[in-house]
Amino acid sequence: MGWWERRRLNRRLEAAEYRYKQLRWVDAERELRAVLEVATDGAGSLVGSARTLLAQALRMQGRLQEAESEARSAIAAQPVPGDGRDGQDVLALVLGDMGRHQEAADLLAATAAARARITSSGHRLVLKSRSDRLQHLAYLGLHEEVVAEADAVKTAASGTDDIHRILLPLAATNGLAFSLSLHGHHEQAEQVLLPVLEEASQQGLGRFLMVLHLGAARALTGQGRAQEALAAVDQAQDTFDRTPGAGALTQDLSALLLARSAALLASSRPADAEHEARRCLSQCERRLGPAHHRALEAATVLGTALADLHRNDEAVELLHATHDAWRTHFGHDHHGTIRARQLLAALTDN
């Protein structure tokens, strides 16, 4: 490929990235496929970048199997992680969306190690991979590992520069709080989140602030402080609504719907909780795999709401299926499996 052709394709790649940032994922996909049609095998870096961005665009459209394939093709074109988002990063996101959290965690650990070999163990991208891995470890129920890794990431992040010195500890703390809540340590999760919520608010961190408010809502719901939890969800919703193109960000919307459904259930409003849980499941079906932790959590909330509405046959049928899905994807002793089993026992013993 000649210099001029490579330059032309790079400009088309930039145009595709611009469309992607505008949330015009279909347009970005079309441009990227046009680039890949004419790019030669020798253009490894360009092909790797195009396939990485294409995998991202496909993921945002909910086309997860295609996104996985493109991310793996991106890795094949550019096997060594570089200094930006690579195929490995996108593949980890897609695997997580599909509920394959162990694979995602293993991939992020390998990516962090590969980046450390060509940079340093304290490089921001190494720490970013380790921080991203925390969420998957939390989903898997590996709380002790989350605690140790979150502390290590926060310590190492003190040596990074500019905004990463702030963002990396906040992300690690969020992962820790999430794991604490999943294991029923709701008061501890709230205490962990309070200072980072204040800092994120002062820094005007937008979407990250939304995520922290949702974490606070989970911690408050777990303590039975349902009205405060609903207020936290409203704060998260306000941040979401002010995000340009928020209507297209259905993964964020499903997180909001799950938090609201759980808080409504704790508020003794099972009919409203049912409505929001069904909306969440609909969003999960569009953008996440059926084995994603959020989809199974929403199904558990829905089953509980149905039981509270005295629709026991529906509740038992749904909770049986949900329990089996938890057990299949996360194991017999996972906290999600145990919760579904306890709910089923309460219904069938009566």
Image (tube, rainbow, N blue to C red):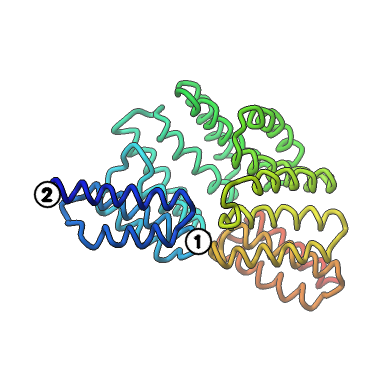
Count of numbered tags: 2
* Closer to viewer: mark 1 or mark 2: 2
Question: Dot 1 surroundings within 10 Å: few (below 14), some, or many (20 or more)?
Answer: many
Give the residue at the far bottom of this rendering.
Answer: 313
Does dot 2 land on a helix, a strand or a loop? loop
x and y percentages locating residue 196 in the rendered image = 65, 30
Q: Residue at x 59, y 35 (%)?
A: 205
Q: Residue at x 63, y 43 (%)?
A: 211
Does dot 1 land on a helix, a strand or a loop? loop
Left or right of 34: which side holds 213? right
Identify which amino acid the numbered label 2 is placed on. Gly
**Residue 266 picture quarter:** bottom right
x and y percentages locating residue 243 in the rendered image = 60, 46
Q: Contact (CB < 8 A) between labels 1 and 2?
A: no
Identify which amino acid the numbered label 1 is placed on. Met
Q: Label 1 vs label 2: CA separation? A: 40 Å
**Residue 154 picture quarter:** top right
Q: Earlier in the sequence, mark 1 or mark 2?
A: 2
x and y percentages locating residue 299 in the rendered image = 68, 65
Q: Residue at x 66, y 57 (%)?
A: 336
Q: Is residue 88 above or below residue 323?
A: above
The residue pinned by badge 1 equals 98
Left or right of 336: which side holds 234? right
Left or right of 228: which side holds 98? left
Q: Is residue 207 above or below residue 275?
A: above
Q: Is residue 170 above or below residue 64?
A: above
Q: Which mark is residue 2?
A: 2
Q: Which mark is residue 44?
A: none
Which quadrant of the figure contains the C terminus? bottom right
x and y percentages locating residue 25 in the rendered image = 45, 58
